[in-house]
Every structure is written in C-alpha cells, then in structure tokens.
Amino acid sequence: MSGSAGRSGASKPGRRRRRRRGRRLTTVDETSAGGLVVDAERANAALIGRLDRHGRLLWSLPKGHIEDGETVEQTAVREVKEETGISAQVLQPLGTIDYWFVAERRRVHKTVHHFILESTGGELSDEDVEVTEVAWVPLADLETKLAYSDERKLVRKAKELFAQQQHTAEGAPE
C-alpha cells in the first residue's frame, strides 16, 4: 500500500472532505518599489499605516507599483511622496522582498525593490486613499512598529549601514 492512502479520496467516518472545484487561479507577477525614508539626522523614518480586513492598523514602509517608463528609483521617490507627503532622494539600494498572495481570483507573486531615501522636504500627509495614517517613527522603534518581518529585516540592515557610515565618518582624518 502506498503512503498516499490519505489522499485517495476516502475519508474517515464523520469527516467531510471538501474539494476545490472551478477555475484555477491566474498567476501574475507584480513589481513595486519604495523604501525606508529617513530624516536628515537618520533618527526617524516615515511609515504608513493601513487597515487590514479585520480593522487592525498595520504599519509598513511606503511602496507602490511601477508605472510605464519609470525606473525603480523613480517609483520609490514618487510612492514615498504620494503615500507620505514627504519629498525624498534615493541614497542607496536596501534590498528586495518577494512574496505571494491571492487577491481578486489571482495568485500574485510580488517583488518589491526597497531603497534608503532621505527626506528633502514636504510634510506628513495621509491624503492618499490607500493610507490610513502616516507617522515619523524613531529608528529605534521601527522593529516593534512594523507589521512585516521582511521589512523589519531591511530596517536592521539599514541600521547596520548607518552605523558603519557613522563609524567611517568618525574615523576619517579632519
């Protein structure tokens, strides 16, 4: 007898087995860009909060879809401005996250390119319809505030980069 007897369709008494019927989900790839936008002193970062389907406020890094003709860097700058109200410039790449989810009868493979950006002006604004709240959050508090582990990992990487840059700057001869 094979080891797949539990999958043969026979079920134990009292248990109903549900089978999925219907069309297969269409798989699509989506690419976005955004990142960690920090103030000039690298003490705070701008986060966006969105309500999930259960009404919980989830904090994350600003990001969004790439529009035709845009580079990932241009998208990151545009999305930061749209979602937070903050104008920023890209300082350096931070990393890429990819994940899967299902929405609107589609299986989506999403890739998000993240950058470290520095604020160059503007004021926090939650006018974007996709955003519930925006806030400047101390860099030290980001790991407890961010909802997603992949973004917390990027923040740790950014903090290490900032520490290395500060150490290098302090060790430079005057």
Image (tube, grey):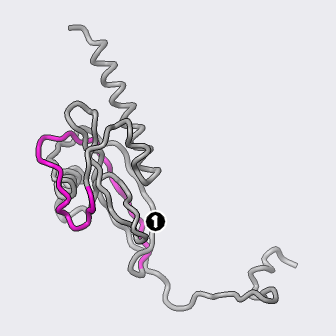
Based on the picture, tell me whether residue 149 belongs to the magenta stretch.
no
Q: Nearer the viewer, residue 72 or 19?
A: 19
Direction from residue 20 to residue 143 in the image, left or right: left
Residue 72 shows in the view:
yes
Q: Which residue is mark 1?
A: 100
Q: How many marks?
A: 1
Q: Residue at x 76, y 85 (%)?
A: 8
Residue 56, image x and y in percent? 40, 63
Residue 159, image x and y in percent? 37, 33
Magenta stretch, main secondary structure class = strand
Direction from residue 23 to residue 61 in the image, left or right: left
Residue 71 shows in the view:
no
Q: Nearer the viewer, residue 132 or 110?
A: 132
From the viewer's perspective, is residue 19 above or below residue 56?
below
Q: Residues within 10 Å of mark 1 (few under 14, many from 20)?
A: few
Please report the bounds of the magenta region as a residue range.
106-133
Q: Quadrant of the C terminus?
A: top left
Based on the picture, tell me whether residue 122 belongs to the magenta stretch.
yes
Q: Residue at x 17, y 42 (%)?
A: 89
Q: Nearer the viewer, residue 53 or 62?
A: 53
Residue 54, image x and y in percent? 43, 70
Residue 32: quadrant of the picture: bottom left
The residue sitting at the front extreme is 55
From the viewer's perspective, is residue 3 above or below residue 140?
below
Residue 142, image x and y in percent? 38, 43
**Is disc 1 placed on a helix, strand or loop?**
strand
The residue sitting at the bottom extreme is 22
Q: Nearer the viewer, residue 113 or 154?
A: 154
Direction from residue 141 to residue 74 in the image, left or right: left
The residue sitting at the left extreme is 121
Q: Residue type at mark 1: give it.
A: Trp
